[in-house]
Image (cartoon, rainbow, N blue to C red):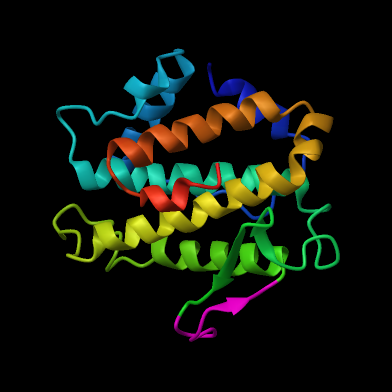
Amino acid sequence: MAFNGFREIFVKQKTFRPKKTFAPDTIRYHLHKRAEASLSSGIDLREAVKKPDDEELNDWIAVHVVDFYNRINLIYGTICDRCTEQTCPTMSGGKKFEYHWRDNIHYKKPTPLPAPKYVDELMDWVDAQINDPSLFPTDIDIPFPKCYISTVKKIFSRLFRVFVHVYIHHFDRLHEIGAEAHVNTCYKHFYYFVTYFDLIDKKELEPL
């Protein structure tokens, strides 16, 4: 399924926060375009996640961190008017799963937060990681740090929680705007990517 429809279905919906882009004429910009072209051509999603032989793995992962951050922002933007402190007093995925926030700065211990506050903190945190040149170097001569993969794993595990909350608590809104098929495709792409590169603990995937 091409992702043109994914963009179109959300174009009239509220965007949770501004989309992140890649600087033109950079390796990641061209990788992003390459990945986008593969998706738009209708290539099987299991194949689309595989790294091209002539590209570096860390760059391929970095591009997808940003792409999934953007897509999950779009998805959450479609339901954020229904996700309030009153309707969603906890960041949960049904009765069995509840997520607490810790960033070691403002929240030094795992802290229960209303879902919209949790997602806001989460997206601020991901944004800060992506914009940290010591974690995501923009200069090709600067190597990725040793903590890169562990940081990426934490990013993906936290982004996954937004999928969990949206699917379990706000699927009716996705159905209402006719977006469920597009969100399902985005989730499959995310799932195939993180499992192919072993970027998320299997226990984290249990809610879905």
Work out whether residue 68 can be spotted: yes
The residue at 80%/37% (across/down) is 172
Boundaries of the magenta span: 104-113
The residue at 59%/52% (across/down) is 162
The foreground one among 25 and 153 is 153
Relative placement, left or right, of 64 versus 114 is left
The residue at the far top in this view is: 42
Task: Give coordinates of residue 83: x percent, y percent.
Answer: 78, 56
Image height of 47 relative to 174, above or below? above
The foreground one among 153 and 143 is 153
Q: Within the magenta stretch, is there residue 108? A: yes
Task: Give coordinates of residue 95: x percent, y percent.
Answer: 68, 57
Image height of 173 relative to 106, above or below? above
Image height of 68 relative to 201, above or below? above
**Dividing the picture into quarters, in which one does residue 195 lie?**
top left
The dominant secondary structure in magenta is: loop
Task: Give coordinates of residue 129: x percent, y percent.
Answer: 40, 65
The residue at 23%/66% (across/down) is 147
The residue at 81%/62% (across/down) is 84
- Quadrant that contains the C terminus: top right
Work out whether residue 24 can be spotted: no
Count every numbered label the image shows and give the total: 0
Image height of 113 relative to 174, above or below? below
The foreground one among 170 and 95 is 95
The residue at the far front in this view is: 96
Task: Give coordinates of residue 82: x percent, y percent.
Answer: 83, 52
